[in-house]
Image: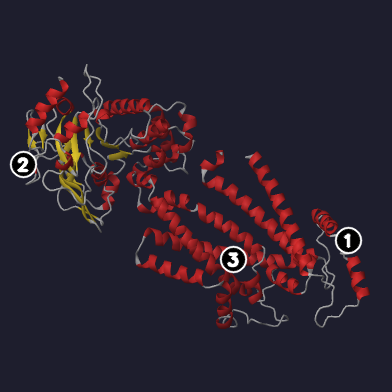
Amino acid sequence: MGKFVIRRLAQAVMVVIAATILLFIGLFVLGDPFASSGDKVVPPETQAILREKFGMDQSLPMQYLTYLGNLVTGDLGIDLNQRRPVADMIGAALPNTARLALIAIIIDVIIGVVAGIIAAVWRYSFWDVLVTIITTLAIGVPTFVIGVWLRQTVSGVWIFPQVPRSFTELAPWYTEVLLPAVTLAIVDAAFIARLMRGSMLEVLRMDYIRTARAKGLGERTVIMKHAFRNSIIPVVTYVGISIGILLGGAIITETLFQYNGVGYLLYRSILQNNNPVIMAIVTFAVLIYVLLSMIVDILYAYLDPRIRLS
Amino acid sequence: MTGSADIDLDGPPAPLLEVRDLRVHFKTDYGTVKAVDGVSWSVNEGETLAIVGESGSGKSVSAMTILGLVPSPPATFPSGDIFLRGRSLLKMPERQQRKLRGSQIAMIFQDPLTALNPVFKVGDQIAEMVRTHQDVSKHTAKKRALDLLGEVGIPNPAVRINQYPHEFSGGMRQRAMIAMALANDPHVLLADEPTTALDVTVQAQIMALLEKLQEDRNTAIVLITHDLGVVASYADRINVMYAGRIVESGTADEIFYSPRHAYTYGLLSSLPRMDQSRQARLQPIKGIPPSLARVPQGCPFHPRCTFATDACLPQVPELMPVDGAGHSAACVHSDRVAIAYDERVTQ
């Protein structure tokens, strides 16, 4: 197990390095954040001073090494726009995104797993057909369509805050988080329901399910104990990846609902060519993703004892 | 369950397990599959009944029907019934039937690798069997699982009890399955191809273990197999099944030394024999078993049969007594088969 963890850690470090290099090149290609653009006029001398101040007069490899060095010491740099520490900006946005991710995941796991089990156990019943139709619709319609529709119809109604709204107006976090969470959960829940249904159907055909029935166990024990533990494994993988994506910021959904999370921050930073913020958020997303896929692997080993040995 | 309810006071005592004219049909898109089509047999305490046939002859479906694990629909039971000590299993409500499953009737399966749940410890799976039918503490159930593992000859049971199925070898897994099946001292043990997935040396060990446990507990064993060789020395009675019917029934000696059905003859001729000084050439049965949705007219075996004549065509032969008291065969040409077999073995 120790060897396994070390190998996975080495892989993780390489993934982070590769991802940040790609990102660096990408941002370089996108152009100079200090150059004049549109009605933003920056005198050439000012541009040169700014470049020097942010270390952008150096060669790209040098810049990258400096960035990596700072990253290791926890220094994420200063944002180009308002000269705030990037770490503080992310620190302010992250709890919102974490809350959003957590609530979305809780909603979609509960709905997805329950719907999947019902559809599998009562296969071809009315409920199975209903689940199939709803999940097909939910997966087929893009998130932003669902998001826009919810924003137009539900926001401003009852406890849901009006979007778009003025930033001086404060709403309690739990009302703010609901609509984006539901938007994110709809597609994921549909996906999990399908995964769960397929996996459960496969497991229900297994010999050990017949053994469980031959033991005289009730159908509920057969399904919720013997079949569940085996069929939940693919769902665990998916949920792990899903949390990773959501923690890195749900850009579209957060932006649609003007939700002050990492995704919305990234969206605004991209519009402003705010490179240090983009770098920091994407690196953070990669880290989270890599970390979560490691946790998923370890969880696997817990759920399926056969993996523990190899 | 009270003791008195189990005893039928009129006439002779009911057999432990009796299958009477059982039919199990499945409605499919390709027609009605007659998996079991009018089968009768019975078994008593301490007896071993072997049901022999090729895959798709309906032998496993009979066993699953006894356990009540054949889902209906799609299955229908047009006729027949199953009696455990005279009580009908088919007419019993599911809840009651479930109580018998694993306590009165237990089953072991062909592939012990897939028959054990991969994510639970072997000991827990056995303890679960105990706790499903007996009101005992977790600790007592675990203790019982430990004793059972020892009883079925698993070395170092105290360690094995906490291992997962994938840490067991094939033979050990089947032993664990047997331990689980015997956890509640069932009256009947259904063994569906218990040795098919195992190495030959392990096969003999498993059969010897079943025989020993049967002697200790007086369990009735219904041994379902496609392998006549396996049943030779263990079965008291043998039912040979073909296309959902019993085509020959008799003691092991009767079946092995004087088969009276052309199909049994075919099975024996395709089996190497150690008990004959000069080996007759092995003769495989040509062709494949019929689809149970489209069983041939008349004797279902006739298209593959070397004895077949027009006499086989008009109707399905009934199971008729031949020589010995309990020996019967459903073959128009049972006399010719007997003569041919004598010639073959004395060649």
- x then y, percent, for residue A18: 72, 54
Task: Give the labeled residue for mark 1.
Answer: A58
Q: Which mark is residue A205?
A: none
Q: Residue at x 69, y 58 (%)?
A: A286
Task: Give the labeled residue for mark 3.
Answer: A103
Q: Nearer the viewer, mark 1 or mark 2?
A: 2
- Residue count near mark 2 (Cα–Cα under 10 Å), binned few <14, some 14–19, many ≥20: few
Residue closest to the eye, A66 or B76: A66
- x then y, percent, for residue A289: 65, 57
Q: Secondary structure at mark 2?
A: helix
Residue closest to the eye, B67 or B290: B290
- x then y, percent, for residue A31: 79, 70
Question: How far, Cα to Cα, is label 1 from label 3?
Answer: 44 Å
**In the image, B263: left or right of A176?**
left
Tags 3 and 2 both on a single chain:
no
**Quarter assignment of residue B270:** top left
Q: Chain of mark 2?
A: B
